[in-house]
Amino acid sequence: MHSSSSDFISVNLRRRCRPITCLVFIVFLSWIFGLHRIKIGYSPTFDFAACDYLCGKSLMDCFQRDYTLIVYRENITDNQTFHQMTHYNVKNKTLMDYLVKSQSNGKPDQEASKKCYLKEINSQYSTLRRQKKCAVIGNSGILLQSKCGSTIDSYDLVIRANMAPVKGYESDIGNRTDLMLVNDNMLGQLDKVLSSGPHTEREKEIWRTLRNLNNTILWYPKDTSKHETKLQSIAKALKMKKLHLQVAFSLKDIYSNIKWKYNLWRYPSSGLYMLAVAEAVCQSTAIFGFYPYEKDDFGKKVLRHYYEKNLTNFKTWAHNFDAEFNMLMSRRDEGLIDMITNPCVPKL
């Protein structure tokens, strides 16, 4: 059987075409015939870690990705996820599809090109809005008889932690709670209270606090991968019980960032998570109720938590409260934060 001329040409190509030459030739042909536009079973992905800032509805509400809070809107579905930065990717999109394009003299703005819209991750998500003045409220008994309530309520954003009760303490700690941090221990208690009801006195107090919150964001700041089931359970229970609360989580676990930022060796307290986010979101930040000692400057005994009835030990292996307090005073002295430990209204 004689070989055809086409067979002869294909044999010659296989013999004479070096790999690099063939590759260039194929790319050239694909460009000529538009083959590069055809997708053959491959979808590019884009990781949001490529963005330095994530934005809400406007560029005014852009935050460093390390301190961005993901907030589920009230009309959440039953399929909400709590995946942090490393899990995010969006199919069939490229980086340029997501970058905020800002033209300056016909050239892209390099700063703007590092900002991405949070809504592109999921339309159910929003984030915090930038604020002028924020108040971060610790739970120290130093707040008792401080008469700081009206002062705290005058701030644009009020941040509290771990379902600290407000009712009955309004004159000293204020009435508003815009953002409520929930740590690992409280996350478990919240899940239990919402799923099976309150039984102990503390659980009943948590339930009362939960019901008194209104338009508050419950925020879990750490690694969500360990507690995604609890977060989903809490979000569903809040919706079922028609409580007007939203659930939020940090786009990235900021544990390491906080230790580096505040130069600490032990585990950061919940107060430092609140402070770090406040400093990222707010133009100015004031902290109340941060006082880790058993006596005040006048020798009066101070409760560890203002809502407790008895004195408890301030010492713990997890946190170095002395180091944290000294760091806070340094930031106060540098003018970075306001730190209120004295009564807001002088005693008569």
Image (cartoon, helix red, strand yellow):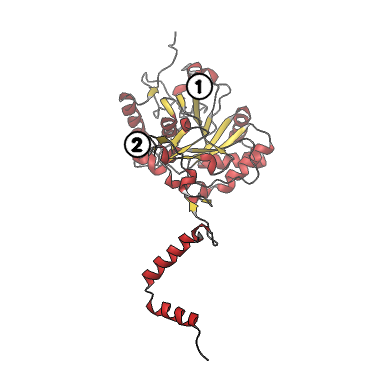
Q: Is residue 195 left or right of residue 318?
A: right
Q: In this view, does 15 lie to the left or right of 94?
A: left
| Rendered position, 267 above or below 167 | below
Q: Residue furthest bottom?
A: 1
Instruction: Say if residue 273 shows up in the picture.
Output: no
In front here: 79 or 182? 79
Q: In this view, does 210 lie to the left or right of 328?
A: right
Q: Which amino acid does label 2 sit on?
A: Tyr
Of discs 2 and 1, which sits in the foreground? Answer: 2
Q: Name the residue under label 1.
A: 173
| Rendered position, 149 above or below 91 | above
In front here: 26 or 170? 26
Instruction: Say if residue 106 shows up in the picture.
Output: yes
The image shows residue 31 at horizontal and vertical percentages of: 46, 60
Q: Dividing the image into 4 quarters, which one contains the C terminus? A: top left
Which tag, 2 or 1, sits closer to the chain's start? 1
Which corner quadrant of the image does residue 254 belong to? top left
Q: Residue at x 49, y 29 (%)?
A: 159
Q: Residue furthest top?
A: 348
Q: Which amino acid does label 1 sit on?
A: Ile
Q: Name the residue under label 2.
A: 262
Of helix, strand and loop, which one carries label 1?
helix
